[in-house]
Amino acid sequence: MTGLLQTPLFIVSTGRSGSTMLSDLLALHPDVLSLSELFNALHPLGFRQDPVNGPDFWSMLSEPRPRHTAWLRLMERGLVIDEFRYPLACALRFRETGIPPLLAMTLPSLTEDPDGLHQELGAYVQSLPEDRLHRQYLRVFQWLCARLGRRLWCERSGASLALVHPLSHFFPAAKFIHVFRDGREFAVSARRFAPMRMGMISQLFKQSFGSAPYLTPDYQAPENLPPAWRGLVPESFDVDVFQHFELPIEPIGMAWSEMIAMGLQLLERLPAEQVLHVRYESILDAPDAELQRIVRFMHPSLDDASWLAQAAGRVRKNPLKWVSLPADERARLESACAPGMALLRRLG
């Protein structure tokens, strides 16, 4: 399990399905480097060049992404985005230039000095000779393992079912842990989740006005913008307006069903021994058994009773929220999620 020989390990999901919890629990393991949101942070440029030399690869890893700049503008106005883990007070210096993606999302979970680690990683990556993209990533992951004293890495990004195609293409021997959740609970959670709300509101703006408000730094609100929408645009952003802006839930359920259908189709193309399906609710019901099943799938040597007791002890059940929706909304949501739920039932 050293060098480039480790089997690549990826945790994938639709998002809002417990993968962050699993990543945080794996981070407690003394042998596991749990990389959170790395490919999510790099999207959409994470696979743009192959082969690639060191300086160009570092550009792929460090070029600011517009959505992080948008997040930063809104966070400065009070919006909370937990996935943005770099301290906000320090991040404000990146207002104009944009924040490097690994600083925004991945490295702060690994060290108390993300800036120092980012600088060290940059020096290493820029020294690399030209090689295939997947081998460059494997070098980075192994370098991080060595630098942080871990033996095996595992990467998890939110909504990463959409990344199964490039990940399985570049890493054909990879193992995938697919974490899934009741689609109705996903929809309730997604409707409250700030980055997903931004995406859904952007779609409404595009449909109504032809452009979205968040990814263009010089965005100008249209003159015919309804008064109830004015708190959604960056120039007059209001956290309370953003959080309480009504979004229909059934399109979220439909989008979830489509993600599940697409993701399962991609995962079914892989050898069965390379895929482990994990139900979020099963982790909550039987954390010891499920966490042990997960690490044994990753590698048998990760079976660790002390870690298991610590990790399982941190799992907390959540009450169902979709059942509290109004009856008509609940019925529409159930119908929207039905195709995805039927596909998941086939997993057992």
Image (cartoon, rainbow, N blue to C red):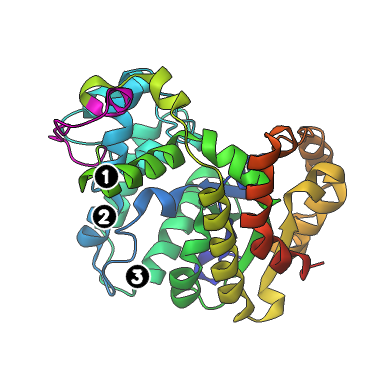
Asked whether, in this view, residue 221 is left or right of residue 332, the answer is: left
Q: Residue at left 60%, top 63%?
A: 260
Closest to the camera, between mark 1 and mark 2, is 1
Residue 133 - label: 3
The picture places residue 81, in percent across and down from the top left corner, at 45, 30
Alpha carbon separation for disc pair 1 and 3: 40 Å
Region of the chain picked out in magenta, as a range: 214-234
Q: What residue type is labelled 1?
A: Ser
Residue 155, image x, y percentages: 53, 54
Q: Can residue 253 be spotted in the picture?
A: yes
Spatial CA span between label 1 and label 2:
39 Å
> Which quadrant holds residue 143?
bottom left
Element under disc 1: helix
Q: Quadrant of residue 99?
A: top left
- Report the residue marked by disc 1: 208
Q: How many residues crowd around disc 3 within 10 Å: few (fewer than 14), some, or many (20 or more)?
A: some
